[in-house]
Image: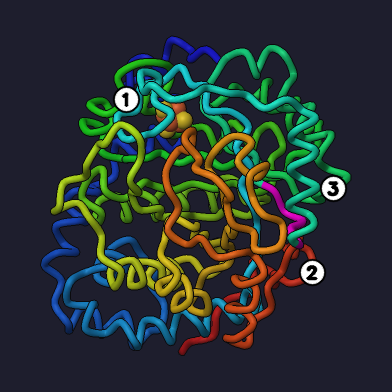
Amino acid sequence: MSTPRKYHHSHEAPVGMFSEAFARLPLEQLADQSREANLARVDTVLRRGRATSLEDFAALISPAAGERIEEMAAHSQRISQRFFGKTVRLFAPMYLSNECVNVCKYCGFSRHNDIPRVTIPVSKVVEQAERLARQGFRSLLLVAGEHPKWVSNGYVAECIKRTLPIMPAVSIELGPMHTEEYHHLVDAGAEALIVYQETYYQPTYEELHTMGPKKYFAWRMDTAERGYDAGFRRLGIGALLGLHDWRFEAMAVAAHAQHLLRKCWKAQVSVSLPRMRPATGGWQPKTEHLMGDRELVQTICALRMLMPHVGITISTREPPALRNGIAPLGVTLMSAGASTEPGGYDHFDENAWQPTKEQPGEQFHIADERAPADIAAMIRSHGYEAVWKDFDQVLVTDPSRELAPA
Ligand code: SF4
């Protein structure tokens, strides 16, 4: 899990990787353009029904476009239904460990936080997968802090192999690895690799990530491409909103997704814009960096109008009312009934699917605590199907198909 030396100097990013292209992107300029865009510029994009450039996307996330949010939502819904049908896929995260060698100032698992540290044994992973399967889940995201021992001792590969008979779709969200290390996880059966950049603004990134391999900005940024080279066929990226100006972050995520769509063309690319939640350590975002509910909806619609085929994930970090409203507007993946504590599902009542005791080792506290069945019912109430297992092969239309003009 060590970082190659060339990544210790961000100006030496490998040719062709996103970190190299990123250095040339005028993201701050685009974020400024977004703040200044007027309604006439927004309406030009809306008449077309599609955003065809990052400049269009900047206009759609502008304060001015906030006045056109209903129109944007209608476009986003139409495009999503065309490419994904009336479906939302459900998945459950399972936290394997909160041991972590990194210092990330905003995270409950940060190395110096005084919390009980645990890595759950494989037998417990299987047991929890069975509990989640009884709730209906067939898609599992394995999450852990970053620790070199998992790479060397085969623990994660074993977790994947043992859960696959129970959960046909297993994804991973772990510390970045080398391509060769990812080969073992792909061979074990993992299908998706999720890694969020947290913030794409390098000065803030360096200020917040002070110890451990995570401090290497470009190494993290190129993780999805290393995973693709190893054979992952779903790639998830995102930014943790609240660390820096959200318009800058949204621009960067959009640019990153476009790069992956071009370069990793055999993969399904998904994006996520999780917003900060309270966590142990008490780190507080600056007010001016916070994204409001309407702005989140607006940005999701703008992403859909820019990239019709991209998956869009909304987690239980978001409150129920917002998740209810946004479910039919462009979201394709939702987590449900989540615990962010390793072994946390041990303490869930299986009927109500609520924790029966405090979760002192959780990474952050979720906002939508509803049971999976309630989330599925909410999705169905919109006339959508809640899909519990992989649907890409049967429901996603041919990505080469062009959208007809609105
Ligand atoms: S954000 Fe991830 S890498 Fe950073 S401290 Fe938390 S678990 Fe570790």
Residue numbers of the magenta segment: 136-140
Position above or below: 60 against 107: below
- Quarter of the image where ligand 1 sits: top left
Look at the numbered disc 1 and give the secondary structure of its residue.
Answer: strand
Q: Is residue 133 at least partly visible in the picture?
A: yes
Ligand 1 within 8 A of label 1's CB? yes
Position above or below: 333 against 47: above
What amino acid does circle 1 point to? His
Ligand 1 within 8 A of label 3's CB? no
Look at the numbered disc 2 and give the secondary structure of its residue.
Answer: helix
Q: Front-most of 181 and 266?
A: 181
Q: Residue shown at 57%/31% (left/top)? A: 144
- Dividing the picture into quadrants, the one containing residue 32 is bottom left
Ligand 1 within 8 A of label 2's CB? no
The mark that comes first in sequence, 1 or 2, is: 1
The residue tagged 2 is 394
Predominant secondary structure in magenta? Answer: loop
User: What number is the disc on residue 209?
Assistant: 1
Position above or below: 399 against 194: below
The residue tagged 3 is 166
Q: Front-most of 321 and 201?
A: 321
Residue 100 percent location from the top left of the image: 48, 21
The mark that comes first in sequence, 3 or 2, is: 3
What amino acid does circle 3 point to? Ile
Q: Are marks 3 and 1 in contact (CB under 8 Å)?
A: no
